Amino acid sequence: MHHPLSSLIDQIVQNAEKRGDLDNLSGAGKPLPAVDNPQDAVLSRMMAEADAKSPVVILKQQITAAQERLRSLTDPAERRDQMLVISELHTKLALEMEAFRKYG
């Protein structure tokens, strides 16, 4: 099937080749890196380059930090409040993971 932009893309690539823009590129002649899910490869690469993190990763980091804070607390009221925070974070994590399982 012919894409309406195919001729424009071909022209851009040919011009880049003539200018030498495609010479000596890093990774030239090497196989493409393996990807777990080809459909998400572009999104995964963009997130890695932007140092973006999924909500699940962020929640796990918050849980770890909250647990470390709990270990340093001695006051029973503060510990109880911190355990509530940890419980809420675990609930949010469970919801995020369930949504990911359902919707990807």
Image: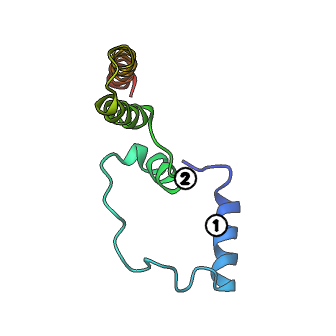
Q: Taking 89 as reference, is 66 above or below it?
A: below
Amino acid beneath label 1 = Asp
Counting residues from the start of the chain, the first of labels 1 and 2 encountered is: 1
Q: Nearer the viewer, mark 1 or mark 2?
A: 2
Colour mode of the rendering: rainbow
Q: Label 2 belongs to which residue?
A: 50
Instruction: Tell me if mark 2 has few (under 14), some (14-19) or many (20+) residues whose alpha carbon lies within 10 angstroms of its own.
Output: few
Front-lying residue, 90 or 21: 90
Percent of width and height locating residue 6: 64, 57
* Residue 61, position as x, y percentages in the image: 38, 38
What's the residue at 30%, 49% (across, down)? 36
Dot 1 surroundings within 10 Å: few (below 14), some, or many (20 or more)? few
- Quarter-wise, where is residue 73 in the image? top left
Which residue is under mark 1? 10
What amino acid type should be assigned to the residue bearing mark 2?
Ala
Q: Quadrant of residue 92?
A: top left
The answer to whether residue 16 is above or below residue 2 is below
Residue at the (34%, 71%) spot, across then down: 31
Coordinates of residue 39 in the picture (x, y in percent): 41, 43
Q: In the image, 21: left or right of 56?
A: right
Residue lying at the far front of the rendered structure: 75
Q: Which of 85 and 9 is in front in this view?
A: 85
Residue at 36% from the left image edge and 23% from the top image edge: 93
Name the residue at 69% across, 84% down: 19
- Position of residue 69 relative to residue 34, above or below, is above
Task: Please state the horizontal and vertical placement of residue 54, each as a whole percent of the image.
Answer: 44, 37
In the drawing, what numbered circle is on residue 84?
Answer: none
Location of the C terminus (image quadrant): top left
